[in-house]
Image (cartoon, helix red, strand yellow):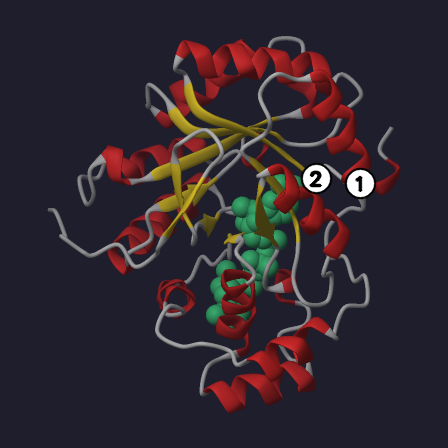
Amino acid sequence: MRYFTMAVSPMIGLNDGHGIPVLGLGTWQMSSKAAEAAVGWALEAGYRHVDTAAIYGNEEGVGRALRSGKVAREEVFVATKLWNADHKSPRDALLASLRRLQLDYVDLYLIHFPVPQRVRSWKALEALQAEGLCRSIGVSNFTVRHLEGLFGDCSVVPAVNQVELHPFLYQRGLLELCRKKGVVVEAYSPLTHGQRLDDARLAEVASRCGKSPAQVLIRWCVQKGMVVLPKSANKERIAENADVFGFRINEGDMAFLDSLDEGFRTCWNPTDAP
Ligand SMILES: NC(=O)c1ccc[n+]([C@@H]2O[C@H](COP(=O)([O-])OP(=O)(O)OC[C@H]3O[C@@H](n4cnc5c(N)ncnc54)[C@H](OP(=O)(O)O)[C@@H]3O)[C@@H](O)[C@H]2O)c1
């Protein structure tokens, strides 16, 4: 059955001419079965962007939800990632992801971590894009140093850099470089992996906005011009996290949220990755 739900999220333009919905559903730490249900609820709630990865082990479930007929394939932006163990042949890795997803292309293919062989793999991704197996290509967990190294060596500038970002880890220098180079930043773990949702200062802003702490964190990313990838496996919270386009955090509260930066990471720190 088709739900004919409306897309809730605006789009951002990528440097390769494609568009990406600002809001995407994160699927890390979901089984295939859980991801199938979550993506189904997300499509009903108006999401049109799903973020998965080979290493998440749930591409089959994501693919099943995409084929459920709720929304046409072309209307959904699907991103997956090249895992560290698969850099020997990025093409084989992408073909395997496509098989699991049962798709003939993904909208975005990312180098998941800045492994030492990243420049060689990036050239392979450029070829995969030219071949049409992925529409856009990008990187993840790249610091300023990793990006600058890549810029010096590549002919295609990454369309996105997917990194941990939220008010408690406001990576201004990285954001600034990405803006300058036309790389869209995708905020992962935007809800601090659930670890700071009960912060009293965040609760103050949420109460002033009449919204939940999760909605405020997502909205902060939206107003900073990022793509944002909240994860939830719960139907109500998936809908709650999409309800972020009908309010605005005022300048004072944005500045207050900016001031919460304490370099707090919930995920790994790629700073020292060689
Ligand atoms: N590229 C990378 O290396 C990388 C690394 C980390 C993450 N990511 C991507 O970014 C996505 C998001 O990051 P994340 O999964 O680390 O965590 P997150 O989105 O920051 O937080 C998810 C946690 O918050 C809870 N939650 C969700 N909505 C909520 C709400 N409205 N109120 C209260 N709690 C809520 C979730 O529980 P329920 O599920 O029970 O709702 C879950 O425990 C990932 O799923 C993945 O797609 C990428």
Query: Label 2 neighbourhood size at 10 Å, few (<14), some (14-19), many (20+)?
Result: many
Check disc 2 and report the residue beneath it.
141
Residue 45 x %, y %: 28, 60
Q: Is residue 253 above or below residue 19?
A: below
Q: For the residue with label 2, is its CB less than 8 Å from the closest atom of ligand 1?
A: yes
Is 53 displayed left or right of 64 in the figure?
Answer: right
Distance Cα–Cα, label 2 vs label 1: 6 Å
Q: Name the secondary structure under disc 2.
A: loop
Check disc 1 and report the residue beneath it.
270
**Which residue is depicted at the point 77% across and 40% down?**
143
Mark 2 or mark 1: whose residue is earlier in sequence:
2
Residue nearest the viewer, comparing 225 with 219 = 225
Q: Name the secondary structure under disc 1.
A: helix
Q: Quick one: which residue is furthest to the front in this view? A: 180
Is 219 displayed left or right of 86 in the figure?
Answer: left
Residue nearest the viewer, comparing 37 with 73 = 73
Taking the image as drawn, is residue 258 in sight?
Answer: yes
Q: Is residue 7 above or below residue 247?
A: above
**Which residue is depicted at the point 43% across and 66% down?**
241
**Which residue is depicted at the point 33% across and 18% down?**
104
Type of the residue with mark 1: Pro
Q: Quick one: which residue is furthest to the left in this view? A: 1
Taking the image as drawn, is residue 29 in sight?
Answer: no
Residue 117 x %, y %: 76, 16
Type of the residue with mark 2: Asn
Is 158 displayed left or right of 232 in the figure?
Answer: right
Query: Label 1 neighbourhood size at 10 Å, few (<14), some (14-19), many (20+)?
Result: some
Residue 212 x %, y %: 49, 79
Q: Is residue 67 above or below residue 95?
A: below
